[in-house]
Image: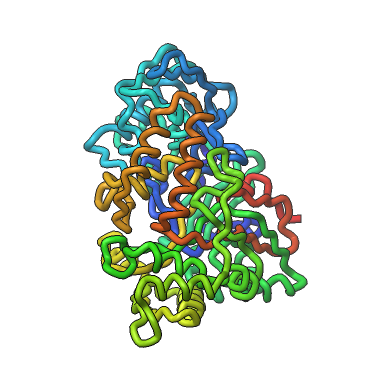
Amino acid sequence: MSALLLAACGEAPRDGLRFGLSSRPVTLDPRYATDAASTRINRLLYRRLVDFDDAFKAVPSLASWERLAPILYRFSLGIEGRTFHDGTRLGAGDVKATYDALLAPKTASPHRSSLENIERIEVIDDDTVDFHLRRPDVLFPGRLVVGILPASGIASGHPFHSQPLGSGEFGFLAWPEEGVLRLRRLADGQTLEFVHVPEPTVRALKLLRGEIDMLQGDLPAELVAWLAQRPELTVQRGQGSGFAYLGFNLEDPLTGQLPLRTAIAHALDRPAIIRYLLRGAARPASALLPPDHWAGHANLPTLGHDPERARGLLRAAGFDATHPPRITYKTSSDPFRIRLATVIQHQLAAVGIDVRLQSYDWGTFYGDIKAGRFQMYSLAWIGIQMPDIFRYAFHSAAMPPDGANRGRLQHTRVDQLIEAAEAAQSLEQQAGYYRELQALLLQQLPYVPLWYEDNVFVARREIQGYQLARDGNYDGLKQALRQ
């Protein structure tokens, strides 16, 4: 193993970069990473076969590919990123070993379900590997985004979760305590320390004091606005793809009524919320995928603020001032999310909808949502790149625990469009089905779309070169420097 990765780490060097995290990574083994922090940090440590461009289309990373037959893809490894951090060469055998491990039931990888269409993997030579599928899938290359591990480490049971060994642009130095993770940028030896500071105000104060150098996301809009006024700091904002929405239990006697959900959609004043509560750091949404996604729908109407129409829908559904709809709205105990829920509660009350707020710690709240114990809730989908999210979120066969159809939507045409898209023979044909599906979902409103939240990066003024990514990844750390 290289001297770099075996270097003893005490205190981080004074010129090291420190990045504040709102949540700590759970694992540094890409076979198991599902949380945002783990996924984003693993991108720095490991290379993957495939990545995504700005329109979220699959593009080559470690490898390019050919579709030799409807159920056969050949991947050819390139030159870059072919050296693991212990000095050994990354080859087709490592690709096969990584994906064989992901598919093995004993591995219990959460990514296995997205790869079950793989029938077998065949190494052609050290640079070439074939994936044989059970059925055609035009999206298949975009599924191969898990970091490649060395076959020898997989075979020996190497503890990748705490001692990662990849071929990415950063190497592992130490994880001396739960809230501190140290990496080194291989191109120039720059040390990078991730520091877990869960409370946003404390994280901002540490940035001001110079105890951390930069942070990204998970800051209330008013705190970002205050930090932007500080001369020692710089703030970057960029369009994001994180989709915020109101979700409903469609089996509930009240929220299962489409006229009531439509009334809620028109009672909301999204532009006012974005302007005053989010300080402009979002754009209104009409669908789960942003309109500039390759399978997005650029011509969907916006559900406008129309209180009179909302009241009319409620009257037609049999509600009035003496008999208003009474809905329980669940959210997390995060102060900003409570504030947002209070604003929504007020806007719905203005048209005659009586909303009772219930806030819980994240674990309790999320557990209730997955179990279907709600009438209405608010959440966001983060880091969505593949349009097959529609099966996971809306197909009638994807109700928990088999998927994330938490509202229990059962709609024959929705299922048909999802299945037609999956059977499409080209991305263009598939995009057409997904656009029709998004228009239908806007009519049926299993979710009321809210907005796409911007990505925000705040740093000490001497930190230069960081570029925000659409999906919120940390790839900007590959170029960040202290001037």
Q: Is residue 74 left or right of residue 155?
A: right
Q: Is residue 115 left or right of residue 211?
A: left
Q: Residue at x 45, y 27 (%)?
A: 138
The vertical placement of 193 against 118, above or below, is: below
Q: Nearer the viewer, residue 381 or 233?
A: 381
Q: Is 124 placed left or right of 224 in the picture?
A: left
Observer-nearest of 419 and 235: 419
**Rendered view: 434 above or below 228:** above
Count of marks, rendered view: 0
The residue positioned 31% from the left and 37% from the top of the image is: 112
> What residue is drawn where x is 37% and y is 31%?
98
Q: Pick the quarter of the image with the C terminus.
A: bottom right
Q: Residue 299, percent across and down?
A: 60, 47
Residue 467 at x, y percent in the picture: 68, 50
Instruction: Depth check: give the residue in front, 323 or 101.
Output: 323
Up the image or down, 400 lies above or below 275; here it is: above
Q: In this picture, is 263 found above or below 117?
A: below
**Outermost residue toward the bottom in this view:** 322
Please say which color scheme the image uses: rainbow
Q: Position of residue 213 (x, y in %)?
A: 64, 63
Q: Residue furthest left?
A: 106
Camera sees residue 90: yes
* Residue in the picture at 56% in, 31% down: 59
Q: Is residue 175 visible?
A: no
What percent of the width, then of the height, locates residue 451? 55, 60
Q: Quadrant of residue 324?
A: bottom left
Observer-nearest residue: 373 or 216? 373
